[in-house]
Image (cartoon, grey):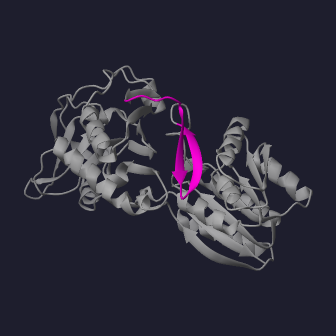
Amino acid sequence: MNLSNAIPSNLKSKRLAVKLTANGEQYVHQGHPWVFSDSIVKINKDAKTGDLAIIFGKRKNAMIGIGLYDANSPIQIKMIYNSTASVVIDAVFFKQKIQTAYSKRLPLLQTNTNSYRLLFGENDGFPSLIADVYADVLVVKLYSEIWLPYIHTILESLIEVSKCKTVVMRLSRGLQNSKTHQLEDGAVVYGTLKNEVVQFIEHGVNFSANVIKGHKTGYFLDHRDNRRQVGLYSKGKTVLDVFSYAGGFSVHALANQATEVTSLDISAQALEIAKQNGKLNNYTGKHHTIADDAFKALKQLVKKAVVYDVVVIDPPSFAKQQTEIDLAKKKYAQLAQLGEQLTAKNGLLVLASCSSRVTAQVFYDINTTTLKASQRAFKTIKTTQHDTDHPIGFPEGAYLKCGYYRLD
């Protein structure tokens, strides 16, 4: 398998003996993938990022799990194995984990869909590593140097299991600035890529993603089923897609014969991608775009007394830090209020959040409280989470929530 020379061959990593606090040990027993630095009681002084951290329990001094040591993160050990059974961490170990992850995606791949998340970080036992597939192109994004000793082996298994013909490497900002490796963000490390914009299919709807320069790995796959459902609601309707980015909800609505769709995003470049994605499909409705700050634009639409049959509001994360939670709650309430005013009689309002620090219950409570205050009768049709290729393996892994509200 001819991987790029920039991909480090399998490096040797040391084994570290680690002891934790009682609370840290309990988290490992519960299968949690994170061990914070303040939970570490004892560890080798010469520990380096990527070393195997063998965690020993206080009882019987026996192994209770294995992780990868990360010297550059407050989460200093990222777990890859939560068990007391003996195991060998080698190519076979990683391949089996990848095969297990792939088997979970098989039902999705039985639909008319050829784009999916093959590895969802911690939730699939690969903390700080994401692997997305777009048709026959695999995009791997690394968020930590812990994987450098193992990335050659992991890529070989990913290619074998996914049968992809091309691999693109994406790097977090921290890794882009690191000088401990030769990897480059957006580098094609296996196969060839004729065009950085790759076309793929999502439940019969055509899309494209810029796998070299696009945000994250090029597209957001977690909302796939919500996009499908919004599309089904949109036939013969007018639709407003707020924070539309590349037009995920907009394009599904158009492909399902919405009469008129408006994509709203602060990025004119993203809106151009949304328009191009729309044109990959047959549709008869009109596709409008508004390039503006969402809060400002929504207030202007309310002033003009414009209403839509379907309103989708899917903002970026408002609470990336603990200190931002209160402000995030206010923003969600404001968006719910504006969305209600823009939703026509018997219309559908879809409100989403990807802020992991704002729990699903808190988010849904904000929505219902705000809608009740509007004095308008409404019904919660459903609440949803990530699509099936984003399995939830621990509480913090459940970041996405989406509520569907029918307004009288």
Residue 399: in sight, yes or no?
yes
Quadrant in the picture for the C terminus = bottom right
Side of 94 relative to 103 (left or right): left
Give the prevailing secondary structure in the magenta stretch.
strand
Quick one: which residue is furthest to the left in this view? 60
Tell me which residue sits at (49%, 58%) in the image: 112
Whether residue 148 is in magenta: the answer is no
Q: Nearer the viewer, residue 27 or 152?
A: 152
- Could you say which quadrant of the image residue 58 lies in? bottom left
Q: Nearer the viewer, residue 142 or 241?
A: 241
Q: Nearer the viewer, residue 179 or 158?
A: 158
Q: Nearer the viewer, residue 108 or 75?
A: 108
Magenta-drawn segment: 191-210
* Image position, residue 296 (x, y; %): 81, 48
Residue 330: in sight, yes or no?
no
In the rendered view, would you say 280 is above or below 304? above
* Image position, residue 207 (x, y; %): 59, 47
- Could you say which quadrant of the image residue 143 lies in? top left
Tell me which residue sits at (63%, 52%) in the image: 248
Side of 228 relative to 133 (left or right): right
